[in-house]
Image (cartoon, grey):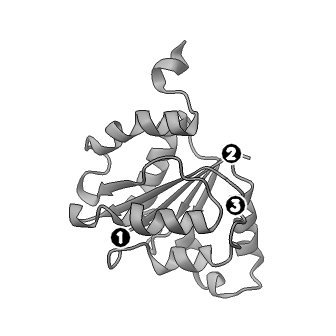
Amino acid sequence: MGVTVLVGNPKPHSRTWQAAHLVARELTGRPADVDLDLASFGPALLDWGSEAVADAVARVQDSSLLVVASPTYKATYTGLLKLFCDRIGGGALGGLPAVPLMLGGHWKHALAAEVHLKPLLAELGAATPTAALYLLDSEWDSGDTLAAWLPTARRALGLAGPAQDAS
């Protein structure tokens, strides 16, 4: 069990991947335990008998916290992420805490994480106690959005913040 980062960007080690790892680290104070960059699975995602994909699904289900990230494509999450999530049965995540994260080029898509990704996670049985997080591609690592979101998210997830960790 541990923190899993699940990224549905077709480009390996993308800004979305970097942002997801930053969010996991900022939430928990340590790197993610499991890194599932779906771009690395390639055609295996289309093979319903793929052991690698089945193992990835099992790792998601065994997590204690899941950060799910996608770039915004056509105002929603990617088909790559949807393809992977189709392998997870409805309700199968059994209340696993999950953080929906999306990156995009403009604030006009900011509701995509809340309106599209968060309900997908709920369908899979994840608990999403935080507001979904949307970050601009141009400032995911330097803007105030993440800093403003973190305290409430930590509280909702029952995680200690930096000041509490130091004591």
Above or below residue 146? Residue 83 is: below
* Residue at 51 percent of width and 66 percent of height: 119
Camera-near label (3 vs 1) is 3
Element type where label 1 sits in the image:
loop
Q: Position of residue 20 (x, y in %)?
A: 46, 53
Q: Earlier in the sequence, mark 2 or mark 3?
A: 2
Q: Earlier in the sequence, mark 3 or mark 1?
A: 1
Element type where label 2 sits in the image:
loop
Find residue 109 and report its image quarter. bottom left
Q: CA distance from mark 2 to mark 3?
A: 14 Å
Q: Is residue 20 left or right of residue 51?
A: left
Amino acid type indicated by mark 3: Leu
Above or below residue 119? Residue 138 is: above
Q: CA distance from mark 2 to mark 1?
A: 27 Å
Packing grade of label 3 (10 A; few <14, some 14-19, many >=20) is many
Q: Dot 3 corresponds to which residue?
A: 93
Camera-near label (2 vs 3) is 3
Amino acid type indicated by mark 1: Thr
Q: Is residue 15 left or right of residue 157?
A: left
Amino acid type indicated by mark 2: Gly
Q: Position of residue 56 (x, y in %)?
A: 70, 66
Depth check: 48 or 153 in front? 153
Q: Earlier in the sequence, mark 2 or mark 1?
A: 2
Q: Position of residue 28 (x, y in %)?
A: 55, 36
* Residue at 60 percent of width and 68 percent of height: 123
Q: Dot 1 corresponds to which residue?
A: 72
Give the total of numbered labels.
3
Q: Dot 2 corresponds to which residue?
A: 2
Element type where label 3 sits in the image:
loop
